[in-house]
Amino acid sequence: MAKKKMRLYPEYLPYVAASAFIAFELLLAVALLFPPRAGQAIDFVSRFTPKPEWYFLWLYQLLRYFPGRWTFFGTVIMPLVFISLLVFIPYMDKDGRGRKIAVVAGLFLLASAVTLSILSVFNL
């Protein structure tokens, strides 16, 4: 018994449309039955202390060390120096001595970012 080949239009289209509609309805039902939490509950009594995400904690800590008119230096100039040092690390790594300088520079940047992040977490 040979099966008849069905084309997408007009034979398969009602089946595809019906399955897409059923899948959408199931997704809508699950979304309405189990709504996601929209963040933390707001406490209007306590004072709000903003905290950045973990990958910006080192910059947040630099704000504490460079207040007032030094803020631009601590939050713009120093990170630009750090990033430019990261960009130039591959160019330092040309010979044996350059490799040591590149490793020391990379470890210094990593250690400073981790240290500043830890200090920011513990509010030191």
Image: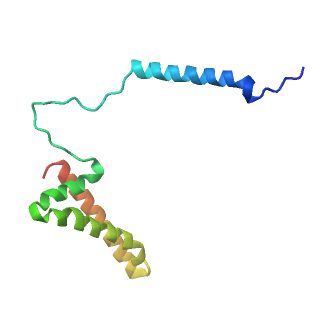
Q: Is residue 21 left or right of residue 86?
A: right
- Viewport quadrant of the N terminus: top right
- The answer to whether residue 101 is above or below residue 115 is below
Q: Is residue 25 left or right of residue 72?
A: right
Q: Residue at x 73, y 28 (%)?
A: 9
Q: Residue at x 12, y 53 (%)?
A: 124
For the residue pair 94 and 59, the one nearer the viewer reads as 59
Count of numbered labels shown in the rendering: 0
For the residue pair 16 and 89, the one nearer the viewer reads as 16
Which quadrant of the structure image shows residue 80?
Answer: bottom left
Which quadrant of the structure image shows residue 89?
Answer: bottom left
Q: Residue at x 13, y 57 (%)?
A: 64
The percent coordinates of residue 21 (x first, y second) are 57, 21
- The answer to whether residue 65 is above or below residue 44 is below
The percent coordinates of residue 75 (x first, y second) are 21, 61
- The residue furthest front is 10
The percent coordinates of residue 53 (x first, y second) are 27, 47
Q: Residue at x 18, y 64 (%)?
A: 72
Q: Is residue 37 left or right of residue 95?
A: left
Which quadrant of the structure image shows residue 90?
Answer: bottom left
